[in-house]
Image: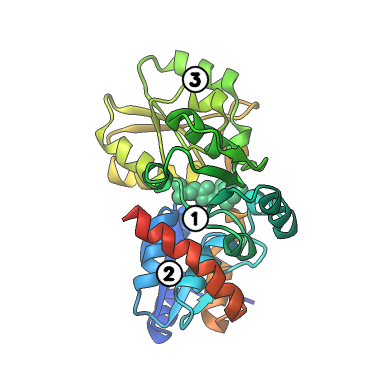
Amino acid sequence: NLTGLDLRAEIDRLRKERNAVILAHYYQSPEIQDLADYIGDSLELSKKAAATDADVIVFCGVKFMAETAKILAPEKIVVLPDMNAGCSLEDACPPEKFKAFREAHPDHIALTYINCSTEVKALSDVIVTSSSAETILAQIPADQKIIFGPDRHLGGYLNRKFGREMLLWPGVCIVHEAFSETELLKLKAQHPGAPVAAHPECPPTIVDHADYVGSTSGILNYAKTMPGDTLIVATEPHIIHQMEKALPHKTFIGAPGADGNCNCNICPYMALNTLEKLYLTLRDLAPRIEIEESLRLQAKRSLDKMIEMAA
Ligand code: 13P
Ligand code: SF4
């Protein structure tokens, strides 16, 4: 029974006692973001995990992110407040099916979005995040055949932008898939001149209306330099918390779903992490991420390649 406990004070006490670092993704609730030692996009959080001298990494994000931290920092204890914090992209790409897809295309390399299981990373050649995908793809010769998974919208965006013909795995992010083009156009009409920033996990019906397309950190940086003082944000709306903190004089509006508001675009997996679970995770150092060593080493190769090529 946690009633009466000052959770924030307890989390602070335990974080010092355990020499723990709290890493949080921009899609976490504002109360978790405000407690975190570092907030970032997927690439930044991976790098933080690899570089930290803490003994414990508390990953406030989803499971594939915590697994990435464990792959890069195996000597650390890595905990995730809720082990059910998955991802629809990971679910859309079962390793056995991905393996069969690879085997059916032996002359292709596998360029794979970080939003996937450790097993799929182990079956891939190079991992990308949304902030590193363009830099990495630009280094791959034009005649190299590529399969890209699991996000068909990010893959399609890259194909269009770079004139490539990567074969796309049919996964989608259920959160970014839920934005409505009709509602977005209505919102744009209500705010003439306001730019739209979209995550590349959005379908083309949304990305085609965007003035800026990029990762969560990319969108946050765009908010700092954009023309005007109102931005329509087509990604998970919890990122708006950081925008409002950094730019209190500007206005940020979450792009709507079919019902005309942005609440259907809250990631249900990210939302499983709560302040209570964060406290319990730090107290009990559980649930922990554990990865079998040969699988970890195999998955690390494609992640190391990402970090090398993204630099
Ligand atoms: P980035 O923070 O790397 O843009 O990733 C977004 C995302 O959907 C994470 O699940
Ligand atoms: Fe996965 Fe989409 Fe949630 Fe990110 S926002 S964790 S891609 S379901």
208 over 126 or under it: above or below? above
Mark 3 falls on what kind of element? helix
**What numbered label is drawn on residue 187?**
3
Can I make out residue 132 in this image? yes
Q: Residue at x 52, y 60 (%)?
A: 61
Q: Are marks 2 and 3 in contact (CB under 8 Å)?
A: no
How far apart marks 2 and 3 lie (CA) works out to 36 Å
Mark 1 falls on what kind of element? strand
Q: Amino acid at mark 3?
A: Leu
> Measured from the top left, where is residue 209 in percent x and y?
47, 21
What residue is shown with label 2? 22
Mark 3 crowd level (few <14, some 14–19, many ≥20, 10 Å Cα): some
The residue at the far bottom in this view is 17
> Disc 2 or 3, which lies upstream in sequence?
2
> Measured from the top left, where is residue 76 in percent x and y?
46, 81
Nearest-to-viewer mark from 3 and 1: 1
> Measured from the top left, where is residue 80 in percent x and y?
56, 69
How far apart marks 3 and 1 lie (CA) works out to 35 Å
74 over 262 or under it: above or below? below
> Disc 2 or 1, which lies upstream in sequence?
2
What residue is shown with label 1? 127
> Disc 3 or 1, which lies upstream in sequence?
1
Nearest-to-viewer mark from 2 and 1: 1
Q: Are marks 2 and 1 in contact (CB under 8 Å)?
A: no
